[in-house]
Image (cartoon, helix red, strand yellow):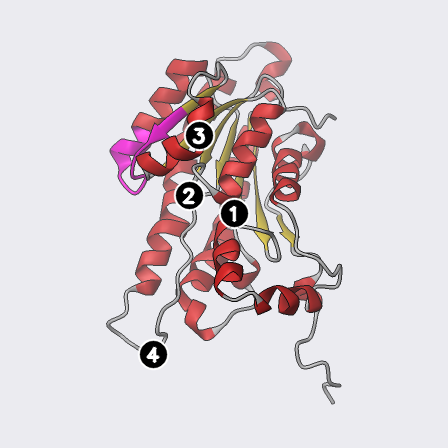
Amino acid sequence: MSFSIAGKTAIVTGAAAGLGHAVARHFLDQGANVVLADQSDKRLKNGCEDLSDHENARLFTGDLRERLTIANLLSATIDAFDRVDILINAAREFSVMDPLDPADGGVEQALAQNLSVALRVSQAVARRMITQAENSDGEDRHADAGSIVNFSSVAAHRTQAELLGFSVATAAAEQMTRSLAVALAPHHIRVNAIAPGSVMSASLKEQLAEHPDYRETIIKGTPLRRIGTAGELAETAQYLASSASGFMTGQVLVLDGGRSLLDAVQRPAH
């Protein structure tokens, strides 16, 4: 077993900024070929300008809610690197909503961005991984055919009313992870997820800029007494993508410094 992903080809969605960007850059540093995909062409070029001439990196812009875009993403990956071994579904949309307003489309929007995109991309990439394995010879046919890593959130289990859409979508993403893990296990494709909590994401940075007092609140509510780094999340993604986790599938790794373990009331239940 090895943590190495050198020479592997990975697609990372939501790679223009935030946690997806951190994972993409970390994978490049580890010797992987990486296709950085994002919906915003401007944001992708601004955040990845130094990667335009990187021989192991490709930039892809498109709305992955469209099936044709997914097909184009896969084609671009195969054209550049001949195969795909890893998929990191890091494209997420975090937004608040009015949970009591029937006209608020927050749930539908969250499901479209945080569930449906990951599902459709996973299905397309998995089919390619299966084809690659079928065309392999000897022992390679039964080796690890690929790894898919989804992004969830601690909000899937511990929520706030205004995060109804995001919570529903991330909870669904975790069940999707388990279902795909079972469906793809006969093909030697593993599917796992990461549920970040107290990790310095782009959305958390924005929140801390607007509300500096949040930092103390988060640290106080985290047993490890700090906010996690994007690098720590990227290393977790590498573990799930590598053969070091070769007997792990259908699992959700919570990366929150212990935050989700606490009882906010801190009083005896009886």
Real-space CA distance between mark 2 and mark 1, rounded to the nearest whole angstrom: 9 Å
- Quarter holding residue 109: bottom left
Mark before the other along the chain sequence, 4 or 2: 4
Badge 4 vs badge 3, beta-carbon distance below 8 Å: no
> Label 3: few (<14), some or many (≥20) within 10 Å?
some
State the residue position of label 2: 118
Instruction: Look at the image and tell me in which quarter the C terminus lies.
Output: bottom right
Mark before the other along the chain sequence, 3 or 1: 3
Name the amino acid type tagged 4: Leu
Q: Which residues are magenta?
A: 59-71
Real-space CA distance between mark 4 and mark 2, rounded to the nearest whole angstrom: 27 Å
Badge 2 vs badge 1, beta-carbon distance below 8 Å: yes
Q: Residue at x 52, y 69 (%)?
A: 159
Name the amino acid type tagged 3: Cys
Q: Residue at x 37, y 74 (%)?
A: 99
State the residue position of label 3: 48
Instruction: Look at the image and tell me in which quarter the N terminus lies.
Output: top right
Q: Secondary structure at mark 2?
A: helix
Mark before the other along the chain sequence, 2 or 1: 2
Real-space CA distance between mark 2 and mark 3, rounded to the nearest whole angstrom: 22 Å
Image position, residue 9 (x, y; %): 52, 22
State the residue position of label 1: 151
